[in-house]
Image (tube, rainbow, N blue to C red):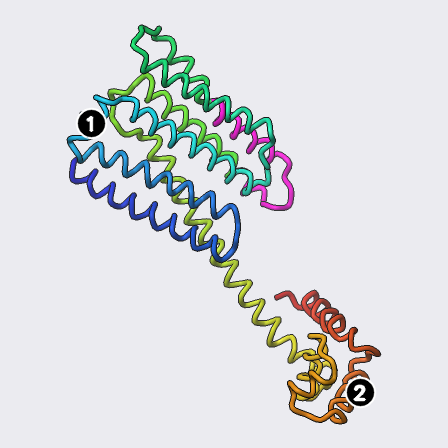
Amino acid sequence: MEYFLYFYNIVLVLVYGLLMSLYFQLILLGKNRLYLWTALLFFVYLADEIYYSSLEFLDTLPAFYQEYPSIKYVVYFAVSISMLICYRIILAHTLSILPEKKEWCFLAFYSLYRLAAISLDLAPVSVPSWRFGVYLFFDLLPYVWFTILSFRHTARHDSRFSAVTYKIIRAASALWLFLCFCCVYQIYFLPELADREICAEIISVFSVIFAVRHLVYVSKNQKSAGAQSGFAEADLETLFAKQYKLTPREMEIFRYLMEGADNAEICEKAVISQSTTKTHIYNIFRKVDIKRRSQAAGKFLEFCREYTQGHPL
């Protein structure tokens, strides 16, 4: 069992670290806040996994935490609050449910409650055993609220996702809430079962599966966008020139017109004389059916729009 946990911890650290680094790379490419908060979530997962690994394989740490129990509570508080924030922002960007000011106020009060609960547990006074029931109720409130939000939003059935996708989201939300309940219940009522929370491990595995699926989706979109971009930049200009019977030289001059270049700049870039430039511009205006050079870009965009509507990329 010890060897299994050893290799299991190594695999989790590698997986969390890899996903975290991939999402941080996506931030540099896409500047998407969803990538940022997903990267931060896996950073928290990674820190939490390293923490539990240290407890299991470094004999000095359990004794240290027994001597200074406040450190253990603070670590658990920081990890749980960080995960809550990441879950909420990821939900906001996935289903377009932006958090309101009252939610941030609730999270602030919830954090104060958690700190008060920690202080009560560390205080050298006798406290009633029924406090665990109160802890269980209040600890589950944010997760219940997130589940309600996801169910409320998926009931609208807008065009962003298919009906099957909405059913999967609702089922995943319900399962996530149940696993969160099991995690909190184990912490307060069954702490002797194991140091690790099995349901928390299952949640992290689901997070990995959804993250991998999301990365595959992003990768396909980027390849599709790259193919469309290459098609638009190269093939559409060729089709435009063929449509209006422009020679390669005239298409080059037309490209300069779209960029807003004047006759002197066209002469310098194309290395031709003023009279040749005027002749090319006159022929372009006649073939493309425009009267001013400011109409060149609009004419090309109109052609692209009409062509792509008739021939989906």
Instruction: Check disc 1 and give the amino acid type.
Output: Pro
**Above/below status of 139 relative to 1:** above
Q: Nearer the viewer, residue 313 or 211?
A: 211
Q: Quadrant of the C terminus?
A: bottom right
The quadrant holding residue 161 is: top right
x, y percent for residue 268: 66, 87
Residue 23 relative to residue 152: left or right = left
Q: Nearer the viewer, residue 94 or 74?
A: 74
- What residue sits 52% from the left and 34% below the top? 170
| Residue 250 belongs to the span the image colors magenta | no
Q: Quadrant of the N terminus?
A: top left
Residue 12 relative to residue 174: left or right = left
Residue tagged by mark 2? 282
Label 1 secondary element = helix
- What residue sits 58% from the left and 42% below the top? 163
Residue tagged by mark 1? 62
x, y percent for residue 75: 33, 29
x, y percent for residue 93: 55, 42
- What residue sits 75% from the left and 75% below the top? 296
The quadrant holding residue 251 is: bottom right
Residue 49 relative to residue 265: left or right = left
**Above/below status of 189 relative to 51:** above
| Residue 162 belongs to the span the image colors magenta | yes
Please provide the residue range marked out in magenta.
Answer: 141-166
Instruction: Kindly report the secondary structure that dominates the magenta region of the rendered protein.
Output: helix
Q: Which mark is residue 24?
A: none
Instruction: Check disc 2 and give the amino acid type.
Output: Tyr
Name the residue furthest right. Answer: 291
Between disc 1 and disc 2, whose residue precedes?
1
Q: Nearer the viewer, residue 199 or 52?
A: 52
